[in-house]
Image: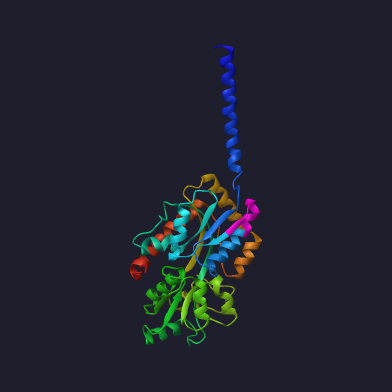
Amino acid sequence: MNQTRRTFLRAAGASAFAGQLALPAFAQAWPSKPIRFVVPFAPGGSSEIIARSSAVEMARTLGQNVFVDNKPGASGNIAMAEVARADDQHTIILGHIGTLAVNPYMYDKLPYDANKDFKPVSLLAKVPSLYVVNPNVPAKNLKEFIALVKAKPGSMNYGSAGNGSAGHLAMEYLKMTANIFITHIPYKGTGPQLTDLLAGRLDAAAVGASAIIQHIKAGKLRCIATGSAQRLPQLPDVPTVAEQGFPGFEMTQWYGILAPSTMAQANIDRLAADAQKAMRSQGALERLNQDAAQSVGGTPAQFAQFIAQEQKRWKQVVDRAKIKAE
């Protein structure tokens, strides 16, 4: 082999080795710009509270701003479809019981595939559903509420943030368990629903604790039961649904981070690690505790397993309650 060819091969090998060394450095540079954290619901509900609490803390460890972008519409389907197509490596979305475990069974056709178009990152938090009535409703507890509904079937109503929302599921779950009938009025988001509930135009609702606990403490709404497994420290005098004659009943909303399936696994792992740090931070714990939310965290594999379990559970509820998109 002549000297010229040997020199060329050595130079080529050195260049390839340098390229291999450069790959991890490039990967470690992520994120290279602010991360867009899409919330598929209107402002004012538990989803936004959880997203903003985690975004603030994640920004500190990621070294880039994490900004929340509310994109409501079609029970979260619009935002989910948009993020499913995002390939900029800097767009994530708040996964939720409705978009992941209910919509796949409530809609005949979805503009996204909950299991193929996304990669689970981390389960952020769980929020117990609180069953509330406006103060004009005479029921002081769940037993009295059920008796009131049964006395005049169909004469009372309840509101939700939308068809297939967590509040809709929570009340339908209670209706099935207690064998009662109450008319459902869907709204376009938790905010508009709460406006009518506080004004007395709605009789009842099941709402995530984060969005409603301040109104309960202020006496503007009456909580007749919590969907949590145990009583909440923030509402120690309010018994759970299970305590009031329905053993084993539990209804919690949950929220986690999803990324488009095109996101690099190294970025997924980085996000998951930082999400866990964020949910364990003192700032996040204080904010979530104030709103009666439970910090969770966890790995992508753990979140994927949790989603699969919830899909199995809520498919049965959707089928039995005959919940369909309107």
Residue 70 lies in the magenta-colored region:
no
Quadrant of the rendered image containing residue 280: bottom right
**The N terminus sits in image quarter:** top right
Task: Give the percent coordinates (x, y) of residue 238.
Answer: 54, 78
Q: Residue at x 64, y 66 (%)?
A: 286
Name above or below for residue 124 compared with residue 214: above
Q: In this orientation, does residue 240 appear?
A: no
How many callouts does the rendering have?
Answer: 0
Q: Is residue 66 magenta?
A: yes
Place of residue 53 in the rendered image (x, y in percent of width and height, measured from the top left): 60, 62
How was the colour assigned to the protein in this rendering?
Answer: rainbow
- Residue 204 in percent (x, y) is at 46, 80
Residue stretch rendered in magenta on the structure: 56-67
Q: Is residue 129 left or right of residue 57?
A: left
| Residue drawn 55% across the image and 74% down it | 212
290 lies above or below 123? below
Q: Where does the image place residue 194, in percent across and percent down from the top left?
A: 51, 76
- Observer-nearest residue: 91 or 52? 91
Residue ID at (39%, 74%): 177
Looking at the image, residue 245 sits to the left or right of residue 122; the answer is: left
**Residue 67 appears anywhere in the view:** yes
Quadrant position of the C terminus in the picture: bottom left
Q: Nearer the viewer, residue 48 or 82?
A: 82
Q: Is 261 situated left or right of 69 in this image?
A: left
